[in-house]
Image (tube, rainbow, N blue to C red):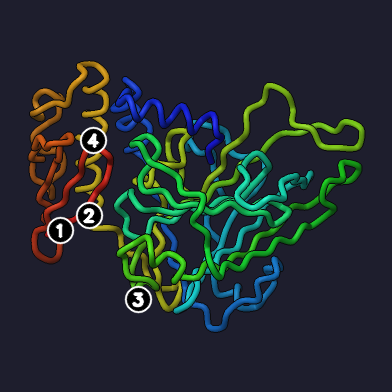
Amino acid sequence: MHSPALLLCLTLAAGAQTPNPDSFTEWRDQMRPIIPRHYVCPRAKTPPVIDGNLSDPVWAAAPWTADFVDIQGAAKPKPRLRTRAKMMWDDDFFYIAAELEEPDVWATLTKHDAVIFNDPDFEVFIDPGGGSHDYFEFEINALNTSWDLYLNKPYKDRGKPDDHWNIPGLRSAVQVRGTLNQPSDRDHGWTVELAFPWRAYASRTKYPLPPREGGQMRVGFSRVEWQVTSQAGKYVKTPKLAENNWIWSPQGVIDMHRPERWGYVQFSRDAAVKFVPDPSAPARDVLHDVYYSQRAFFKQHGRWAGTLAELGLPAAAHASVAAPVLTRTWDGWRASVLLSPAAGPPQLWSIRQDARVWRER
């Protein structure tokens, strides 16, 4: 989620290369300790009918995710309302269903690509390649009004949202369990059903879609919730209360645009298949140690560090990961690590100053 004012602040901050001086502490203490959640996404035996009604028998094969938590994780209270989601896939679509408990269902925005999170909303983030760049965001409210956009990289790294990108072939539906925009009664909530066509992402990612059997993607789900009061028969946001951000896999910080902490979705024939932890996770974490350290170092010194010693990082941070090699480049820096996974040959992974992570070999 991101308001125009927030977008401006983030863009200006990133453009001036003035990251949070505590960015490494934020990573080390709030983000790195969180283990991203995971989900085994079963293949749909038949396509669900996209009507917002989740009682379609085909959905019975898909387990619910764990209930959503505060975006900052266990450091914050448990959400007062339940949110959970399901996923399925086939050769044509990535299917998502969500159930949002809500005693006061309301929505006002009717224009496509409006800033939907100004209403209560449900949001989907998809990073097909897992490199923290070239990812997609989708938001929807209880009126079935949506906002879809592509981001070349996170806002903190000078990312530029492309609102002109749309999802051709998208199917979406919402069902309100109660009465929309009616404060005089109490509702049960609303449900969302989505079908994202794989072909819609083909022009913006090199990652093969649909995923192969056992393939994984990084996916984030978020719910923005506003507390309201009733005035003259209408819902009004409670003054001076910020929105709640409840998500599937906590970020540790109030910023959904940290793809390195989104959940893992593994695509399999059947939900009973065991999830396979990402073998590259130790390398990714060590590389992010360097990334967040560099951001803090630049804030303090006005330049990038040239050695790990300047950053105060240990030579080795994980048994399976060799010490990072830090290299200055024409536009910043690159850090690379050699990962020795439990199975298979060694792998070389890298990160650069704009948070892009990739496997070199």
Task: Report whether 159 appears left or right of 293.
Answer: right
Q: Secondary structure at mark 1?
A: loop
Quarter of the image for residue 352 reads top left
Q: Is residue 105 among the parts visible in the rendering?
A: yes
Question: What label sits on residue 287 in the rendered view?
Answer: none
Does the residue at mark 4 contact the one at mark 2 (Cβ under 8 Å)? no
Question: Which amino acid type is shown beneath numbered disc 2?
Answer: Ser
Q: Secondary structure at mark 4?
A: helix
Q: Residues within 10 Å of mark 2 (few under 14, many from 20)?
A: some
Does the residue at mark 3 contact the one at mark 4 (Cβ under 8 Å)? no
The quarter of the rendered structure image containing the C terminus is: bottom left
Q: Which residue is the site of mark 1?
A: 341
Q: Residue at x 17, y 26 (%)?
A: 304
Residue 187: give x, y in percent of width and height: 81, 50
Q: Between disc 2 and disc 1, whose residue precedes?
A: 2
Q: Which residue is the site of mark 2?
A: 280
Above or below: residue 210 compared with residue 179:
below
Q: Which residue is the site of mark 4?
A: 291
Q: Residue at x 29, y 52 (%)?
A: 131
Q: Which residue is the site of mark 3?
A: 213
Q: Residues within 10 Å of mark 3 (few under 14, many from 20)?
A: few
Question: Which amino acid type is shown beneath numbered disc 1?
Answer: Pro
Residue 48: give x, y in percent of width and height: 61, 76
Marks 4, 1: nearer the viewer: 4
* Distance (Cα) linking label 3 and label 4: 32 Å
